[in-house]
Amino acid sequence: MAEDAAAAGDLIERTGARVLVVDAQERVLLLLGADPGAPEAGEWWFTPGGGVDAGESARQGAIRELAEETGLVLVELGPAVWVRTAEFVFLGERYRQAETFFLARVGSHQIDLSGITELERRVIHGFKWWSLDELDATTDRVYPSRLAEEMRLLLRDGIPDEPRDVGP
């Protein structure tokens, strides 16, 4: 999600859904990606998820995106744990995406990228299970920007009564 402002064009408002996948070692799964329309913007790490399709709830979109991007098929997700509004440029279009995050705990999972779309093949370059200490230490771009700090709070305090705003 390149953070640069687009030179022209309207802001596209959309709804997104993301999943915080945490394994038994309390590592969080992140995907590595880039904007194929702006390779000069570099790469960044992000949680599985994306835009919610028409007629889907955020929860349904999160389940669908998770299966597409990781091969992890869940029947249900618990309550939303975080929200944020992300503004970014992708393929030359400016977006403001209202995102809802859900937590999925897994013992372990072998990532399967075979379900990704053709566009996602151009966007997703890899994946990694990150410890929170590794996230603290990295100089790589990670979204949300306070992921390690917010994950520590979530893992320590549990599911909040209302989704917590985790910022950019």
Image (tube, grey):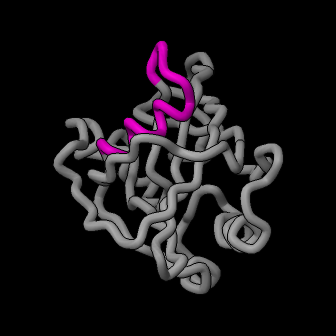
Taking the view exactly as shown, the residue that stands out farthest to the left is: 114
Q: Position of residue 55 (x, y in %)?
A: 48, 13
Give the tally of numbered discs.
Answer: 0
Q: Is residue 125 visible?
A: yes
Q: Position of residue 41 (x, y in %)?
A: 46, 53
**Residue stretch in magenta:** 53-68
Camera-nearest residue between 115 and 10? 115
Q: Is residue 7 visible?
A: no
Q: Quadrant of residue 29?
A: bottom left
* Magenta stretch secondary structure, dominant: helix
Q: Position of residue 124 (x, y in %)?
A: 31, 52
Camera-nearest residue between 6 and 159? 159
Left or right of 66, for residue 100: right
The vertical placement of 57 against 110, above or below, is above
Residue at image point 76% right, 50% down = 167
Residue at image point 66% right, 72% down = 148
Residue at image point 41% right, 54% down = 40
Please check the rendered image and state whether residue 92 is part of the magenta-colored stretch, yes or no: no
Taking the view exactly as shown, the residue that stands out farthest to the right is: 161
Please check the rendered image and state whether residue 60 is part of the magenta-colored stretch, yes or no: yes
Q: Position of residue 103 (x, y in %)?
A: 58, 55
Residue at image point 54% right, 24% down = 57
Left or right of 5, for residue 124: left
Camera-nearest residue between 69 and 140? 69
Camera-nearest residue between 130 and 7? 130
